[in-house]
Image: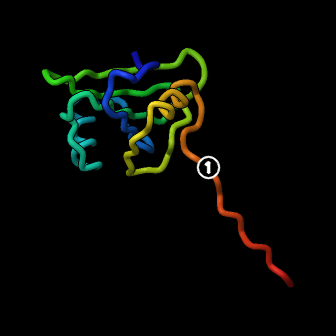
Amino acid sequence: MLNDAKGFRRVVIACGRTDLRRGIDGLAAIIQEQFRMDPSEKNVLFLFCGTRLDRIKGLVFEGDGYLLLYKRLAAGRFQWPRTPQEAMEITQEQFDLLMSGMTIVSTIREAKPNRLY
C-alpha cells in the first residue's frame, strides 16, 4: 500500500525524528499542535520516521476514521529529512523516490569563499 500513494490527495512528511511508539491520537496531536495542520483532512497521508531509518508510520483520515500504517523495510533505509520541527508536502515523484530509498531533499552546502592572504 505504501509503495503507491496515488490514492492520496496529498502526502506530508514530518521531518526529523518522531517517537514511533505513539499511536493514532499521539500522531494526530503532533500534526495539529506542532505543524498546525488538520489531521482529519480526508485522504491526506502524514508520514513519520523514528530514530531507526528502516521504519515509518503513516496516518490518514478516510472520512469515517483513521488508518494507521506501519512499514519496516526488510533491507535498506529511508533517506529521511532530519530538519526538526518541520512538515513538508512532497510530490508523487518525491514519494516514489523516498519509498525506493533515494534522497528527496537537496543536501547542497554553501561553499565558503576563498580567502586571499
Is 97 situated above or below 3? below
- Number of marks in the image? 1
Q: Which quadrant does the C terminus fall into?
A: bottom right
| Residue depicted at x 38% and y 23% | 6
Q: Which quadrant does the N terminus fall into?
A: top left
Residue matched to label 1: 107
Q: Residue furthest left?
A: 64
Locate residue 45, reporting x and y percent. 32, 30
Mark 1 residue element: loop
Locate residue 100, reporting x and y percent. 56, 24
In this orientation, which residue lies closer to the viewer: 71 or 94?
A: 94
Left or right: residue 90 compared with residue 31: right
| Residue depicted at x 38% and y 51% | 85
Is 49 situated above or below 75? below
Locate residue 50, reporting x and y percent. 44, 34
Q: Residue furthest right?
A: 117
- Residue 76: which quarter of the image? top right
**Colouring of the image:** rainbow
Is 71 situated above or below 48? above
| Residue depicted at x 18% and y 34% | 40
Q: Badge 1: few (under 14), some or many (20 or more) residues near its Cα, within 10 Å?
A: few
| Residue depicted at x 20% and y 35% | 41
- Residue 112: which quarter of the image? bottom right
In this orientation, which residue lies closer to the viewer: 3 or 77?
A: 3
Left or right: residue 94 compared with residue 1: right
Q: Residue furthest bottom?
A: 117
Amino acid at the residue labelled 1: Thr
Locate residue 36, reporting x and y percent. 24, 50
